[in-house]
Image (tube, grey):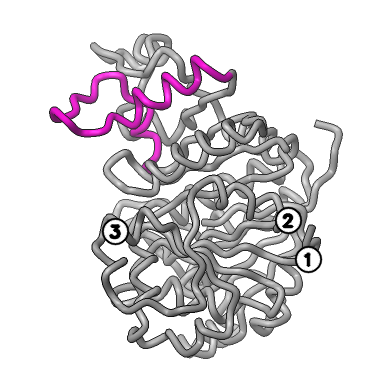
Amino acid sequence: MMSHAILHTVNQSPFTHSALEQCLCYTQECDAILLLENGVYAALLTHPLSDKLSGKKCYAIEADLQARGLLEQTLASHIQLINFTDFVGLTTQYKLVQSWY
Amino acid sequence: MTENKKIGITLRHAPYGSDLAQEALDATLAMGLFGQQITLFFLADGVFQLLKSQSSSDIHQKSVEKQISAFELYDIERVFVCAQSLRQRNIDTHSLCIDAVCLSAAELQKALSTQDTVLSF
Amino acid sequence: MIFSLLVLSPPSSQASLSAYQFANALLLEKHSLYRVFFYHDAAYNGSSIQCIGQGEFDVIKAWDTLQEQYEFDRVVCIAAGLKRGIINETEALRYEKTAYNLNNEINLAGLGELADATVKSDRMITFGG
């Protein structure tokens, strides 16, 4: 159990919205980021924040990537693809969940 | 409700364009009424909620500034505002309608991480 | 663990579907769900008269089924609901409205229910956007 760590969820595309950029400002070493819904576009290797994101512990909902045809694209290799059961598991490991939308 | 939890509320949206800010503040006041330990985090466009001299009657909306001014009555005294968000928007702390503690992003993360739970608005 | 969810998005937004999928997953994992609080535009999740196109997913009906299987509270914030036209019989009489549409399985209640859920749950997860 990570008692002082935060799980940040981001569900907006980094190409149209500043949710991920804001999230990255307030994320510390111990925290993790979960990309879901349109947030999974941030898993593309070439978006403007991928460098900053690469230093973070990062997960993405696989079904959201699959739905958007992104599994065929070049994705950042450090991002771990998970399902909703894993998402629930993460929320039990991290004491707090901050949603960026 | 006998337990006393540390509840963090993050407020990141500008007022008036949608009623999210207003409803978030309503929720905040309700939490205060229930005797919980509330800490508010005004981040990003949320800092616009704190501006002085809001006069929203011409756009047919209730003043968010008035809601915020009621914090004291509800014993909501821990109010943090992001220094970087203020700087990016060229807002001076003298332009804010309440006394808020200005913190860096790292300090805000630390303060947020000590809460028992977070509501994200 | 005891979970509660704060949902802020209407059925037309994927965030409301994510909230449902999250609830389903946590219940399958034998966690308990105390309350789902629909606030802001999520009040539209309280309708009983939505008509969903053929082959499309009816998230409100899915909540009904989930709630039938597991016991948990579904609450639409009364203030958020009333101003969006989500209303039960009692409130329709009070405000002299000619119709009401709140889903039978859902309570219309105040923000105190959100405060109560926040205090009584180990985890409160917000779904917005």
Q: Amino acid at mark 1?
A: His
Whether label 2 touches label 1, CB < 8 Å: yes
Residue A95: which numbered mark, if any? 2
Mark positioned earlier in the residue sequence (2 or 1)? 1
Residue B52: which numbered mark, if any? none
- Residue count near mark 3 (Cα–Cα under 10 Å), binned few <14, some 14–19, many ≥20: few
Same chain assignment for discs 2 and 3: no
Residue at 51 percent across and 25 percent down: it is C74
Mark in front: 3 vs 1: 1
The chain ID associated with circle 3 is B
Q: Amino acid at mark 3?
A: Asp
For disc 1, the marked residue is A4
Q: Where is residue B114? Give x, y as percent.
A: 79, 64
Residue at 44 percent across and 52 percent down: it is C128
From which residue to which does the magenta span run?
C41-70
- Residue count near mark 1 (Cα–Cα under 10 Å), binned few <14, some 14–19, many ≥20: some
SS of the residue under disc 2: strand
Q: Amino acid at mark 2?
A: Lys
With respect to residue A95, does B105 lie above or below? below
Same chain assignment for discs 2 and 1: yes
Relative to A75, B117 lies left or right: right
With respect to residue C109, does C117 lie above or below? below
Mark in front: 2 vs 3: 2
Q: Where is residue C65? Give x, y as percent.
A: 42, 19
Q: Where is residue A25? Give x, y as percent.
A: 56, 81
Which image quarter holds the N terminus of chain A? Answer: bottom right
Nearest the viewer among A3 and C77 is A3
